Each structure stands twice: as structure tokens, then as C-alpha cells.
Amino acid sequence: MSEPVIDVSGLTRRFGDNTALDSVSVAMPRGAVYGLVGANGAGKTTLIKHILGLLRAQSGSVRVFGLDPVADPVAVLSRIGYLSEENDLPGWMRVDELIRYSRAFYPAWDDVYAEGLRQSFALDPDAKIKTLSKGQKARAGLLIALAHRPELLVLDEPSSGLDPIVRRDILGAVIRTIADEGRTVLFSSHLLGEVEQVADHVTMINRGKILLSAALETIREMHRVDGRVLSLDEIFVARVGTSAAAAEV
Amino acid sequence: MHSPVAAFAWEFRQRHRWGLIAIVVYLIVLAAIKLVILAHDFPIDFDSAETFAFVFVLPVSSYFTYFIAVFTFGLDGDITARQSMYPARMFTRPVSSAALAWWPMFFGAVASVILWTATRLLALWPSSIVVPVVWPGFLAVVLLAWAQALTWMPYGLSGVRVIAVILWLTAIDIIVILAIHFRASESLMIAFLLPQIPLAYLVARYAVARARRGDVPDWSGAFTWFARIAGVSRLRRDFPSAARAQAWFEWRLSGKSLPVWVAIILPFDLLLFWVAGTSTLLVIELLIGVLLIPIIIATFAAATVSKPSVDVSDSYGLPPFMATRPLTNAQLIAAKLKTTLASTALTWLLIIVAVPIALEWSGEMPLVVDRSHRFAQTVGTPRAVVFLLLVVAAFIASTWKQLVQTLYIGLTGRAWLIKGSIFVTLTLLFLIGPVAEWIIDTQRLGRLWSALPLIFTLLVCVKMSAAVWVATRLYRNRLLTDRVLVAGAACWCVAVFALYGVLVWMLDTPHIPHYLLLLLAILAIPLTRLSAAPLALAWNRHR
């Protein structure tokens, strides 16, 4: 078996008295779509920030492509495409400036693919980022995350608060990326139906602990009730508890 | 809490309770000192200027600065941003814009009046000072009200708020100082100050209403000509490397600030040459003033250099877009340093072109040339030329130094550290006046001169110890390679010895020992704070 793309071992993170991640261990082999699901505040973004090297492991270890993302940010980040939940693209840039600026960082940048994505996302190259709608900003962010054909695509709540058309675009782009052989996608969401559509493997996280991590098919097999396959929503509610799920998901 | 007023009051009290408690404690201490000294005739001289400065001037100035920070909401916002500093979260409260402006102004005014009245009653005033009763309280209210109005106003360019606040408050201060000098009566001072309070309120109300409807002007269009000159017009080329792309990004983010601000202020200063007449001294003073502009502006522009984003008004942390650039921390810092060098060069190019033109057109050039010739005759032409070049180089280097020396604080992304350092700096600025006066008044200049070697030696020890600590951390955290560290140290040593050589040549006098010049050169060349910038960025980027 090949070395996992992401290998997190015994990762614990505390913010004051709050334990955001509690001895989290997860390994993600190459070439599949991983859905990271959990309620708001479960620890999904904290885990992703450790994978990107934006948070330093207080205890435990994080390896991406076998490297420490804090010690070796260039080697790790140049192979990752990342779409942030915060949608923090510089508002003063124009779309074509964003593309030219971003391409300088990635030797594998594919101009034809980038232009294809720009046209399919209907992004005006002359438009300033700050004048784009939330959905268009998400599309612009997705474009620069995908255009260098990253080995690992990390999408942090990519469709949160977006309309169904943008969500379809994002899911479509994810599926196209999967089609590229050997690429890996880590996809966090609290929209479980969305994860169910595209993920091969699901990791459920709650209050900083991994509740469940297995192939989607295995999870479904494990959660049959009277011969009926439960949806991911139902499995999540069963695992986390009705009140927490209803309040937060 | 049954009313918006109570909600406002509760928020101020709850958030700033420790600061308010500290003020109450200070006033209790003042009262205790007064009662103890009056009752027991304690042998402490409160009539001296230095005791008065430390017991009254420094604490009260600090508390008033604190009030400005609290009641302008300056602890929440970013003073350099275009957006209003009034917290946006309060715009959704079901109260009018007039009320949003009024209550913080009202509470600020009450707090300032209480502070003044209490200190007027409790402090032991030197017998040489005639202490007015009412108008200083009004002055505090007016300064705070204008600070509120000007900080809540949205502006069309980043950093304009800083200039507007400083210029306006300084103008009021100068008028008041002149009034004191000419012994204006209390009624006249009140007549000058009182009408400003409603005026400031109206401006504040307008500012809050504008900010509330999201009306933030954008004046950057007015400087497109400048952008074209500076080569920052729209990007239409591809970058040959990631480092070049990042340098472009930094230039667009912060590089323009210094040259644009200087370009705005410079014409007004140059106009003064036309009113200088034939006074050589005045022309020289004006010239020095003009040359100081970039350094002073760079002090404020430095905030934009370390700021990670212009889009969020209260953002200090590194946004994910920046943090996930596949560049090392050293490369990110290098892009900033390149930008500051370009920014400094462009600014000084502007000065070097504009000043001779202004001197020529105003007819003051012959005065300057004549003065230069006389100087050359006195010290010799080579020394005069080197001195002139050294002065210009020192001004340019100081401008760059101002831009980069606070990077190690700004890049930490910790609001408490950034705002704390501003508070400490302001407090130290308040201290400089009284301390300088104390040194001069008490004939301690000679003693200070004698102690200078010891002071310099201590400062050098502190600087070098800090530099060793920073270098060790940089190496251990793999932020810089040993090769870069050694090369950096070698460059620094060369710069120190070069400056030392020039100083020895220029100041060849038995009154100044050479080792003192070496210590001065070591202190003058930036090292520790600059090399701590990658550490600060790493602390911010990998939290």
C-alpha cells in the first residue's frame, strides 16, 4: 500500500480550556475523495488548518506527503489546492490578476484548464474580486485551487451558504478532479447529503474526536436497519445524538 | 438592562472595568498623598517639575490616551483602514445613528470631565502653576469628541485617518498653547472650546450615518496617474517567479502608501518656501522639515506594511489566502523588504526632484547654495560633500528603518501586542517632554553626557543579546539557513564598520572617543528587530 497523503497521529489541540481536537488519528491514502463531516465547531476546520500547517501540532504529529507542513511549507503547499471557508481572496485584485498572480506559485499551472474553468464559471476577467457575489468568489477560489492540478485538493465547507447552482459547480469540479488519476480530495462539510454524493470515504468528527472513519459503502453496510440502508444524515444523528445534530447540523 | 443607554454604559463598563479600576485606584492614591502630606508635612518635594511630571502629567496623559482608545472604539478597529472605526456590529442595533454617535460621546465626555475635576481637586500642583478650573476639562472633551468624529468617519484612502486625526488635534493643541502663552482668560478659552463640542457631534453623527449605510468612498481613482508613474497600473504580464509575484502583491498592498502620502503633503510644505523671505535660517529649517516628512509619514505607513489585508478593517492575523502561499516565511518577509526599499526609493526620488524645483521657483536656491559654499569653506569641500551625502543617506535609511522596524510586532498578528505597543509608544512620547525638561532644568546634561558610554554599552549589550536569541531561534526553527544567517551577520558587520569609519572621519575630535562612535554605529544599524520579523511571521502563520 502506498504512503498516505495525509497522516495525522494522536493530534491534540487546545484553545484555552476548550479541546478542539482530542487525540485525532487519521490516514488518507492517495486517490480518493474523503468527506470530513461534523457539526459546527466539531473540529473540522481545526484539523484542516493543521494539515495546511496553519496550526502547529501541540501534541501528536501531522504529515502531508510524508512532510511536516509547518517545517516545510513550500514543499507541502505547492502540491495542495485549497478553497477556504472564509473566502478571503484579495478584494482589490481583478480576476485576471488573481489568475496571473496565482500561476506564478505553481509550476504545474495549466493555462488551458484555468481558462476553461474561468469560462465555465462565467467569471469576467476584468471584474474586481470585491465586486463579485459570494458564489462567484467561491468559483474564483475554486479556479485557483484547481488550475495547478494539485495532488491534494482541500475544500473547507466549500458550499456553505451558497446557492444550489454554485454547489453543483463545486461538486462537478470535485468529480472532474477525481477523474484525474491519482488525485486526492479532502472535503469538509456539514451538508451530509452533499458529502454522500461524492465521497468514497467518510470521517465523522464530533467535539474534537473521530467518531467513525471508513469507506462510505462500509458505513452504509454497518448501518442497515431492517434491511434499509440509512442515509448519512440518519447515521450522523444516530452517532452524535439527536439534540446535538438537530441544533447544529 | 431596559434601555439602549444602559446597554452602552454596560458595554463600556464591562469591557474596560480593569482600566477604570486602575483610574479609580490612581485617584485614591492622589487623595491619600494629599491627605498624608497635608496632615504630616511629609518631606517629599511635590513642588518640583519632575515629581509633578511623574505623579500627574504621565498618569493623566496615559489615562486620557486610554479614554481616546476606549471611547473611539480604537481598541476594536484599525486606524489605518478606510472603513469607519465604529464597530459594524452596533449598526444593527435598533437605535438611530444620532444615538449611536451621541452615547459614546456623552460617556467619553463625562469620563474626561470626571478625570479632570478629580485630578484638579486631588493633585498637588506646583506653586508656580496657576491651574485653571474649567477649560482644561472642556479641552479634554473637545479633543476626545474630535477624535471620535474623525476616527468614525470613512475615508477614501488607507491611512488618511491617521493624518486627519493628528493634524486636527495638533491644530487645536497649538491654538490652546498659544492662548496659554498669551494668557488668554478662562472665559475666552471656554468661548473657543465650547462651540466645538456640538460641531464635533454633528460631524460624528454624519460619520456614523455614512458608515452605517456602508458608504465608504474610494479616492484611489484620483491617483491613477501616480499609479501609472509607479508602474502599478493593471497587471498585464506573467511573473517570472513566485518571489516577483509576491513582491507585486506587497507593492499593491502597501508599497504605494508612503509615496502617495508624501506626494499629498509635500506641496503644502514646499509652498512655505515662497513665504520664507530672505531668512537663511528659516529656509534651512524649512528644508530640514521637508526632509523629515518621509520619516514621519513612514512611521505611520509602517502599519500598512505589516498589515496582511486591506479588505478587513480589523484584521491582524494572516488570512488563509496569504498563509497558504507556497513560500517560506523568509521569502514572504523578503517580498515585504523589497517593497519597502522600492517605496522608500520612489518617495525620495519625489523629494529629490521636487525640492530643488521648489527652491529654484521660489527664489530661495541662491540662499541655500551660498550657505553650502560657506559650509564647504569652513570644513573643507570633501568633508562637506561627504557630510551632505551622509545626511541624505541617513534620511533615506531612516525612512526605510521606520517602515520596517515595527514589522516584528505587526507580523505577529496579535491584536493585544500591536495595540499594546501603540499604547506604550504613546506613553513614552508623553514622557519625552517632561524628562527632557527635567534634564535641562536640573542641569543634568553634563551628567548625561558622562553617562553616555555606560548607557550606550548597556544598550549594545541588550541589542546583541537579543540578536543572539533571535538568531538561535531562526536557526532552530529552520526559518533561515546557517548560510543566510552568516551572510546577514557579515553584511551587518560591514555596515557597522563602514558607518564607524565615516563617523570617525567626520567627527575627528578629542571630545568624542572612538569607542563611543563604534557603539553608536552598532546601535544605528538595524539588526535585532529586523531579523525578528520572520520569527513573528512564523508565530502568526503557524499558530
Image: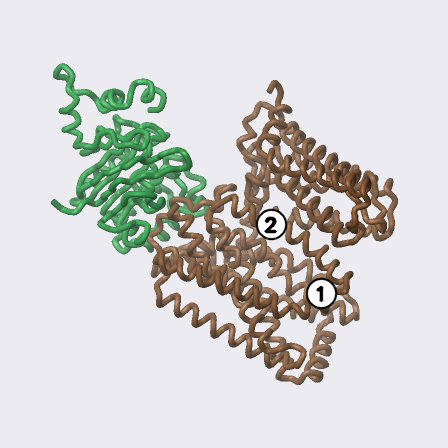
Chain colours: A green, B brown
Q: Count numbered badges in the picture.
A: 2
Whether residue B161 is situated above or below residue A163 in the rendered picture: below
The residue that label 1 is drawn on is B286
Q: Amino acid at mark 1?
A: Leu
Whether residue B488 is situated above or below residue B119 in the rendered picture: below
* 2 and 1 marks on the same chain: yes
Whether residue B449 is situated above or below residue A211 in the rendered picture: below
In the rendered image, the residue lying farthest to the top is A226
In the rendered image, the residue lying farthest to the front is B40
Is residue B349 visible in the rendered image? The answer is: no
Circle 2 packing at 10 Å, graded few (<14), some (14-19), many (20+), is few
In the image, residue B448 lies at what x, y percent? 69, 66
**Quarter where residue B37 is shown:** top right
In the picture provided, is B120 more to the left or to the right than B16? right
Q: Residue at x 51, y 73 (%)?
A: B496
Circle 1 packing at 10 Å, graded few (<14), some (14-19), many (20+), is some
In the image, residue B161 lies at what x, y percent? 61, 46
Chain under label 1?
Answer: B
